[in-house]
Structure formats: structure tokens, C-alpha cells
Image (spheres, rainbow, N blue to C red):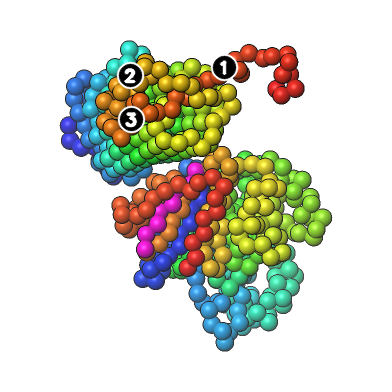
Amino acid sequence: MEPLNCDDLSVREVNAALRSLSPGASARIDHPRGRHNLAVGLADPVTITVAGNAGYFLGGLCGRADGIGPDIEVDGFVGWSVGENLMGGTIRVHGSASQSAGSSARGGTLMVDGDASLRAGISLKGGTVAIAGDAGAMAGFMAQAGVILIGGDAGHGLGDSLYEAVIYVGGSIASLGADARVEELTDDDVLVVKRLVALTGFDHIDPSRVHRVASARQLYHFSTQHHGVY
Amino acid sequence: MCGVVGLLIRDPALESRLGALLSPMIEALSDRGPDSSGIAVYSGGAGSDPDHDTVRISLGSDVAVPWPAVCSGLSERFAMVARPVPSGAVLEVPTPLADEVQAHLGRHWPSVRTVATGRSVAVVKDTGRPEHSVRAMALTEWSGYLAVAHTRMATESAVTLLHSHPFVPAPDLCVVHNGSFSNYASVRRSLMARGVRFDSDNDSEVAARLLAERLESGDDLDEATRWIMKELDGFFTLVITSATGMSVVRDAFACKPAVVAETEHYVAVASEYRALAHLPGIGAARVFEPQPEEVYTWNR
């Protein structure tokens, strides 16, 4: 397919063209210039390259419940909520991501080569959010399932009100959020991180030296003894 | 939502293109705030000539005013320049005449309000989408060294010209706000009890007046901005400009977006990157998001 030029096409036209691709086909988006909602809602395994910086919701709602989906690569940075509600496939951002990267994703893999801003992996429901660099405050807020890997440092309030998602941090943790705790790293954890390092190529992360952050599960139930704090 | 943009020129060669660079910035954010817009442009002229002590006064109104008639009436009566913009007017008034000019306006055009004063700033506000105002005022032809603009999605008070940002609570001090404050009515009451006057019942104006009060009391911009964080409960990206520079600050949760692009030729800030994507040399610019509760200031 000819490159899709955002200087000539509306976002709706770009997305309609992407949706017409046959499984296995590929396409390139030129001159995105920070436009929102590019390459959203694609169910098939196609390959998309975004040649520049994209705006909000890049690759959102992509993939199917069985984990199949497009492979999207961005040669630049992205705005808020990249890969929101991702179901399958992969999104690779070669720059940094703004807030709420991978929010509510249920499947697939989001990889950010740079840093991610606040609330990365908020309300994650499955799938994987991997950040090579630092993550801003409140990463993993209320994340319910899935894995968040942070190669660099994590900001304040990490994993606040976590459910069953697990966060691995290669660098330092500014502070933990409510009910999040650092737990001992098991052999299974090391294996999980080893696989993620192999998948992402984030080989500056030493799988045996990451911090495992998970829920202390103290907020799961109300306690009459603590009624004063609710 | 609302959209905010600011542009501080560092390379004097770009000053003649200020309006042309700013126009697509604010138009790109039109969908974030289709209700009204406000554009402030700082340039030399009025205040830059020490031999001619003049003040620049920007006018607006919430009712229809025949601005060409207002302007011709003023320039016939006083030795001054008056220019319709066209949703208001910008006056260059010799400072000794300023009170007389205001009294004249009060007598002949009681619905006219002063929306800004200063030595450097001219402010144009209007209801409707920003592209409407950009075209009407021929913004692409304006030059200057600093500009800030706002496009408003009204959430808490009326859509009128006087409710539009920027608010100019002191000479040459402009404040634009994306966000909302929840306790602004009580903060406004305490400011009014201390003698502060308001042009509207807009929440953002409370932040602007509080900021000006703190600056007047001797706080520097950093201290004054921390006062906003302490007194006001809410979400904000604020862009604050004065004759000397531009500042940006975001609330503790960074609920409202902001992106900065910095080169040796300019510093630009916008709610979204797509408002910056057309700027010259953007590919090589240092692009970053301001951290929560950190006050960033760039001076001329």
C-alpha cells in the first residue's frame, strides 16, 4: 500500500484504509504531526509503521480477544493513552509516551523505548506494558491483571490500590501507593522478566535484580475495625 | 477541556512572524474549546520609548459596541491611537491622559470594559471558535516577542467575552487556565473582602486575582504560584506571562496536559503536541512535559 499521508488524509480516512488491509499486509503512516486516534480498532494481524510523533490513543482498541492483533511501530513519541484497551498484537514506541500508557489494556504488548509519564498501566486488565526508561507517578494505579515492567525508576505512588497485576521495577521506587508492597522475587518472577527482556530487547534490565511490586490485598475487604479510615 | 498555548520568541528575527506562528497553534486546539477565545500579544511600542510615557489599554464588551465609532471618537478627542480589533479595541494612551480617557469611555460607552492594561500587552477576546478571532483580527500579521492564547470550553460560568481568558489582573500580567477549581467561590469572597475587584464570576479569574495579590505583596512568581496550589482546590495547567517572560505550572496530579518545545529560537507551550508540530525546527527541539507542581519560567 502507498504510504498514508496525514497531510492529505483525515484520521478517519487513514483508519478506514488500515482497516481494509488483508491479514499479513503492511502500511506506513506519514506526517502524523501529533494527530489523535491513529491506527485504532484494528483487529487483524497487519504491520503498521507510524513515521513520526503521534497524539492520543494511538493503537487503542486494537486486537482480538484471542490475543491476535496488529504490530504497530512508532518512530517518535506518543500522547496520552497509547494502546488504551489493547486486546492483542504489539505496539512499539521508539520515543517516550505521555500519560496513561496502556490504560485498561486486556491483552497484547505495549513497549516504550523511552520514558512513560504518569499513570502508565492504569487499570490494566491483562497484557503487558513494558517501559525501558522511567515511569511517572501513579504507575499501575488499580491495575487488575497483567504485567508492568519498568526498566528505569518508578515515580511516587507506584501500584496504588493494586489488584492482581504485578509490577517489576529495574531502578528505584520513589514511593509505593496504598496497599502496594515490594515482595520477594521468586524463580518464576525471574523467568517472567527474562522472557520480557528477550521479547522487548530491554537488555539493560537484569531479571534477577528487579523489584517485584504486588498488592498486599488489605483493601480487598472492608474491616469494621478500620471503619474510621474509610 | 480548554486549550492553552504560549510562545516566547528568543530569536529577534522571528518576532515579525509571531502572529503567523501563533495562529495555527491556537487553531489546532479549537476542538478543545469552541466557546470563546482570547489572544494576548506582547510587543514593544507603547512602553518601549522612554520619551513617550504611554499605556496600552485593551477594551471589550459583553454587548454589541460600534468599535470603529468608539475609536474615532477617542482619537478625535485625545492625542492618542485607537484601533478596533474588531471585537474590541486597543488604545495607545499617553499615561497622563489615561484617567481622562477612562472617564470619557464611562460617560459615552458605559458597556465598554477594560480587559487589559500594560506597556506591552494587547489582548483580543471574542466568543466563538479561535479561528474566527484569528481571522477577524488578522493575527498572522501581528508581530511581537511573546504571546499567550486560550480557547475555552466553558464548564462553570457563562460564555461571554468578559468570561474569556486571558485574565489580566495587573499590568502586563496574563493568566490562562485549562482546568477547574472547586472552591473558587469562597476564595473569591475572601479576596473581595480584601478589596479585590472582579470582571466576571469565572473560576480562573480567581486564580489570576490571587496570583496578582501575592505578586503585589512581594512574592516572586514561584511563591505566588505555590499560593494558588495552597488556596485553590482543583486541576490546572496555567500559563502565566508578563512583560519579561512566560511560566507554566501544572497541578499535583498533572490532570491537564501540557507540552513544551524549546529551541534556541523560541520556547513554546501547548495543551497538545499537535499545536506545536508546525513550528520551525520542531524536529530538533527539546520536547517535554512539565512535571506536576514544578514552576517553569523562561525569560526574554
User: In 3D space, how far apart are the residues under numbered discs 3 and 1 (Cα atoms)?
Assistant: 28 Å
Q: Residue at x 67, y 42 (%)?
A: B233
- Where's residue B204, x and y in %? 64, 50
Q: Nearer the viewer, residue B63 or B290?
A: B290
In front: label 2 or label 1:
2
Closer to us: A179 or A208: A208
Which span is picked out in magenta? B257-264
Work out whether mark 3 precedes mark 1 in sequence or the reverse, and give the earlier one.
3
User: In this rendering, is residue A217 above or below B121?
Assistant: above
Q: Can residue B275 be found in the magenta stretch?
A: no
Q: Nearer the viewer, residue B274 or A227?
A: A227
For badge 1, the amino acid type reads Arg
Residue B80 x/y as whole percent: 60, 80
Closer mark to the observer between disc 3 and disc 1: 3
Where is residue B92, by image quadrant?
bottom right
The kind of residue on which mark 3 rests is: Asp
Q: Are marks 3 and 2 in contact (CB under 8 Å)?
A: no
B299 with respect to B24 (left or right)? right
Marks 3/2 same chain: yes
Q: Secondary structure at mark 3?
A: loop
In the rendering, which numbered label is found on residue A206?
3
How many C-alpha atoms fall within 10 Å of the one at disc 3: few (<14), some, or many (≥20)? some
Cα–Cα span, label 2 and label 1: 24 Å
- The answer to whether marks 2 and 1 sit on the same chain is yes
**What SS does tag 1 mark?**
loop
Q: Who comes first in sequence, dot 3 or dot 2?
A: 2
Question: Percent x, y for residue B30?
Answer: 47, 46
Chain of the residue where label 3 is placed in the rendered structure: A
Q: Residue furthest right?
A: B193
| Residue to which mark 2 is pinned | A191
